[in-house]
Amino acid sequence: MSEKYDAIVIGGGLGGLSAAATLAKNGQKVLLLEKHYRPGGYAGSFVRGRFEFEIALHQISGLNLEAKRGSLYRSLENLGITKRVDFIRLPTVYRSVFPDIDITLPAGRENAEGVLVDIFPHDSEGIKRFLDRVDATNQALSTLQRGAASEKEKKEIKENFFAYKDATLAEVLNKDVKDPKARAVIAQIFAYFGLPPSKVSYLIYALGWGDYLRYGGAQIRGTSQVLCNAFVDIVREMDSDVRFNCGVKKILTEGGRVTGVVTDADEKINSDYIISNVNPITTCAELIGVDKCPSSIFQTMNTKELAVGSICVYMGLDIPQEELGIDDFEIFINSGYDFESLWEKIRTGIEPEDFGLAIYNAAYPDASPPGTTIAVLTTTSYAEPWYKVPPSKYVETKNRVADIMLTKAEKFAPGIREHIEVVEVSTPLTNMRYTGNPGGSIYGWPYAPKESIMYRLPQEGPFKGLYFAGAWTQIGGGFQPCIMSGMMAAQKVIAGIMKK
Ligand SMILES: Cc1cc2nc3c(=O)[nH]c(=O)nc-3n(C[C@H](O)[C@H](O)[C@H](O)COP(=O)(O)OP(=O)(O)OC[C@H]3O[C@@H](n4cnc5c(N)ncnc54)[C@H](O)[C@@H]3O)c2cc1C
């Protein structure tokens, strides 16, 4: 029988890592069990040839590196992460290329407003109104997080935050901005969120896009693996434990509360508190067991759709970035302005339409060895169409899909194909294989209003002592939300331990 831990964290994705580090930093003896050989889940890196590729991160929000530091930065600072990780502020939000408009949106409210108003002068009032609204929503969230002090602040939170809890981006944006092209430029990172403007939550969009726009998103020097490794180092330095290649196959329960886990190697480890960073579907159905969990949890989860997955074409190029002739980090290449019909095609098809091109050396030049460049093509994709591909045709199909994306990218970056030294392609099925997430979903449940913020699955699991952390639960998917989610779950566990 192993020693008893104050808490066990299952899964070393961002939610699990931040939960374990928060627990350890607060004096709890914690054990993190990760089935893969490295920490991170979707976050992190992989190596092919002489290139180390970032798996996921395009932009992390919540850091506010230029000014007084954002809430995520301050939380990471408390854990000792910011001393170990070099966050790099991105000067532009994105470059958006349409058939007849090519616009680069700089970070900083005034700069971004200037560019938008310059291109769409006829819609300048509406654009300013929308940007003010987004600012007010972000401000309301900050006030909410620190606790509203006055009646005036409470009113502002009600009007600028809670009033939008059921609103989609299109419902809000379309009232302010009239030109469909201006709307498309503003809604461009619907591609990040995986739902079109008519379906994505306004609050989620305003918080993500608003943060990138106002403060600039960030990259991590050396890939997000550096961040994940830093969490692990902190856990270990605090005399707690992390085990890799150590999956969990059972969560043990007794009398309505969790009592421990059984690993894939059949080791039983006891603890009264478990934070599961494994998606809640697998946690409840497989790790605990359908017969043991209350049926209400499955009823809640069965009614939900899954968020989108991704297709990535990771390329190591044998030429320096300057020779590629592209200065921007994140470029969205669009065939048109109608994101609604584009999303319908994404839902049902495999063949990618539009995509993003990220040049990591534009974020920091040493992203790859001297004289080389890392370029990644990314698009969203659902697993269902991929399930229909017979296994014998899978590799051929994903290579064909990569070829389609590359052919489109060549129009924008002529000659890119000739300079590919190594290439790797991932699909929603790759996501599933490496993280176990159903459908290869990158955000858990979709970012629709009814699945977001206060509607998101609560962190408290169906047994006492069980908490969820990560994309599927509060606050939601993405780097900032998942890290915060782990910290929040850890605080709940600490509160429970203190009460005893
Ligand atoms: C291509 C791509 C691009 C993205 N770009 C961005 C971006 O630019 N900005 C942003 O904010 N977000 C981005 N995201 C989303 C973000 O990466 C995810 O939402 C986030 O990393 C999910 O973290 P998580 O805590 O839910 O854990 P996950 O990443 O889902 O990890 C779960 C972990 O649990 C482990 N596990 C599973 N089962 C078991 C078990 N039985 N026992 C032990 N361990 C187990 C898995 O191995 C895995 O390590 C992107 C994602 C992808 C795929």
Image (cartoon, helix red, strand yellow):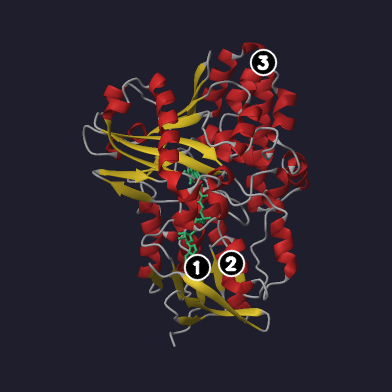
Can residue 255 be seen at all in this image of the molecule? yes
Residue type at mark 1 is Ile
What element does badge 3 sit on? helix
As drawn, is 186 to the left or to the right of 249? right
Mark 2, residue position: 283
**As drawn, 419 above or below 143:** above
Considering only vertical position in the picture, is 483 above or below 86? below
| Viewport quadrant of the C terminus | bottom right
- For this orientation, the residue located farthest to the bottom is 1
Q: Is residue 268 above or below residue 374?
A: below
Give whichever of 477, 418 is nearer the camera: 418
Give x and y (percent) for residue 24: 45, 70
Q: SS class of the residue under badge 2?
A: helix
Is residue 91 visible to the viewer in this orientation of the structure?
A: no
Q: Is mark 1 within 8 Å of ligand 1?
A: yes
Mark 1 lies on a secondary structure that is strand
Is there a contact, CB below 8 Å, between mark 2 and mark 1? yes
Foreground residue, 395 or 371? Answer: 395
Tell me the CA gap for discs 2 and 3: 49 Å
Could you classify mark 1 by the number of other residues whose Cα lies within 10 Å: few (under 14), some (14-19), or many (20 or more)? many
What is the C-alpha distance between the residues marked 3 and 1?
Answer: 50 Å
Q: Is residue 338 above or below residue 363?
A: above
Which residue shows up at 41% across the image and 25% down it?
407
Give the residue type at disc 2: Thr
Mark 2 or mark 3, which is nearer to you?
A: 2
Which residue was labeled with disc 3? 123
- Residue drawn where x is 72% and y is 71% of the image: 294
Identify the residue under disc 1.
Answer: 10
Residue 351 in the image: x percent, y percent?
52, 33
